[in-house]
Amino acid sequence: MEQTKIILDENEMPKKWYNILADLPSPIDPPLDPRTWQPINPEALEPIFAKELIRQEMSSERYIDIPEEILDVYRLWRPSPLFRAHQLEKVLKTPAKIYYKYEGVSPAGSHKTNTSIAQAYYNMKEGTERLTTETGAGQWGSALSLACNYFELDCKVYMVRSSYYQKPYRKSLMTLWGGNVVPSPSSDTAFGRKILQEQPDTPGSLGIAISEAVEDAIAHENTKYTLGSVLNHVVLHQTVIGAECKKQLEQVEEYPDVVIGCCGGGSNLGGIGLEFIKDRLEGKHNARVVAVEPSACPTLTRGEYRYDFGDTAEMTPLLKMYTLGHDHVPPAIHAGGLRYHGDSPIISKLCAEGLMEAVSYDQKEVFDTAVQFARTEGIVPAPESAHAIRCAIDEALAARQTGEEKVLLFNLSGHGHFDMASYDKYFSGELD
């Protein structure tokens, strides 16, 4: 019988993160100081980030060792399983083989723990006592609350207002692990109060929540800021996903023709895709890597590739990325983790140079797909992750038309157990 679950032993877990900056054909555009429009001095970032994370952000090392203390926590859920979607393949009547990496097995229910554990660890080692962050759907806020619990740090989470009320049990989970969660914009920061006064009915945005978290971190000497996606060091930490996928597919003598990930900031897409981009750059294989985003926030498919701020209040360095504009507030779709105005500089550069491609889907068709997947494979996907499933199904249906026996791989980056209110709205016909 063909395998359904492909499992690695704990001893086969990756011991290094892969840094694609060492292999890019041309250097990535550096972050700029908005006051001078010159490359920013790393020391200027120290009031916000841990020094080791700044070093990783700028590093040109091809591989960076994962400390044993981080590996000890990773072992709670890593290596994560790779599944063959036999039931979905049967329903689709496709000759394609569909594999998915399931990151929902982590304690927080998504891939975000791969970087939250690392960021909390490095901050703890440098004497930080408190971390601030933003969160969209709550997956990152949950992951950071868990990580701060392990390394005895206080955690303040600014959760985008629309998701705060759409997903109340994400707030409960963060509180369970010791996080302090408020809806953003909030009355806890000067920028939050300004937005509330000007736009009392705003659904909020990740750009606004980032501004609040950065303001909070700057205002407290014992505090640093953390980000759950976009930045180079965050994408770096996620590369354990792709490294495990390679080993798992080798067990069944397969290599993907198409690698797919949903994309908001770009971390889970980079996590599964960069190892295969490396092979492409080395001339070994030529897998397509596809970013899937919501048509309500289509940064890669409709944004501009230019320098922009990462937040609404213009407190961050300028990053070269695909962007809809840092003051853009997307509609309050239920894939709250994908409501970001920009993208990772790494992902943006790869798309601009044709090494990645991007597609977008409407909310309704994504939920159609999520229900189909739940009824075949049994796993309830997060709305964000369902974007990747939608693309994988389209690729499988295209293979049915051509008769090609393609191998498809996508990242099921998180479960949807805390998104049931969104599914209820889908079944009641209330989704736009």
Image (spheres, rainbow, N blue to C red):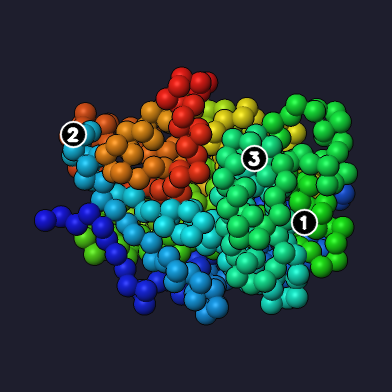
Vertical placement of residue 202 versus 218, above or below: above
Label 3 amino acid? Answer: Tyr
What's the distance in space between the residues labelled 1 and 3, CA to CA?
36 Å
Q: Identify the amino acid type marked 2.
A: Lys
Q: Which of labels 2 and 3 is toward the front?
A: 3
Q: Which residue is mark 2?
A: 93
- Helix, strand or loop at mark 3: helix
Apparent side of residue 4 relative to residue 427 in the rendered image (left or right) = left
What residue is rendered at 67% in x and 71% in y? Answer: 152
Seen at 74% across and 29% down, the residue is 202
172 with respect to 391 (left or right): right
Pointer 3 residue: 164
Task: From the top left corner, tell me how far across and down residue 74 is, in percent.
Answer: 48, 69
Spatial CA span between label 2 and label 3: 40 Å
Lower sequence index among marks 1 and 3: 1
When asked about the image quadrant of residue 177, the answer is: bottom right
Crowd class of label 2 (few under 14; some 14 to 19; many from 20; radius 10 Å): few
Q: Is residue 310 visible?
A: no
> Where does label 1 land, which residue?
39
Query: What is the x, y in percent for residue 178?
Result: 66, 61
* Element marked by disc 2: loop
